[in-house]
Amino acid sequence: MNFSEALKAVKEGKRISRTGWKGKGMYLFLVAGSQFKVNREPLLSMLGEGTVVNYHAHIDMKTADNFIVPWLASQTDLLADDWGIVEIPGAR
């Protein structure tokens, strides 16, 4: 599928990936927006304890070495037609 279709899928709560990615087990997922009160660093020293933060929805990546990192699309990702849905047994 193309990126437009993949983006629609991730907005629906599905996990997506490209077959062109070299890392095994990598995929993207949507992190819903939320609110929380600051209670630890690094925000504690910047905003103060108890400050309400509005955390905007964004897309994260699960990397091949099992880290979760923020994701930003490259031009190659945006123009690719090798996107697909990732099914993870037992995952919600």
Image (cartoon, grey):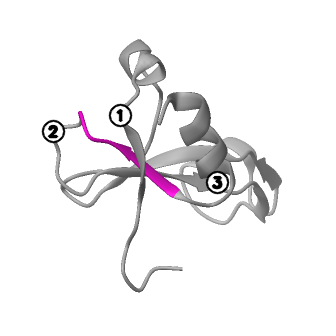
Say whether residue 55 is visible: yes
Name the element at disc 2: loop
Mark 1 = which residue?
82
Q: Residue at x 23, y 33 (%)?
A: 20
Q: Is residue 11 above or below residue 3?
A: below
Residue type indicated by callout 1? Asp
Q: Which tag, 1 or 3, sits closer to the chain's start?
A: 3
Q: Is residue 19 magenta?
A: yes
Q: Residue at x 41, y 86 (%)?
A: 90
Query: Residue 12's mark?
Result: none
Disc 2 residue crowd, few under 14, some 14–19, many 20+, Cα 10 Å: few
Distance Cα–Cα, label 1 vs label 3: 42 Å
Q: Report which quarter residue 22 is drawn in.
A: top left
Query: Residue 44's mark?
Result: 3
Q: Which residues are magenta?
A: 15-20
Disc 3 residue crowd, few under 14, some 14–19, many 20+, Cα 10 Å: some
Q: Is residue 62 above or below residue 18?
A: below
Query: Residue 22's mark?
Result: 2
Q: Is residue 1 magenta?
A: no
Distance Cα–Cα, label 3 vs label 2: 38 Å
Question: How far from the left and from the top, in percent, is residue 7?
Answer: 60, 39
Say whether residue 45 is visible: no
Q: Nearer the viewer, mark 3 or mark 2?
A: 2
Question: How far from the left and from the top, in percent, is residue 42?
Answer: 54, 49
Q: Which tag, 3 or 2, sits closer to the chain's start?
A: 2
Residue type indicated by callout 2? Lys
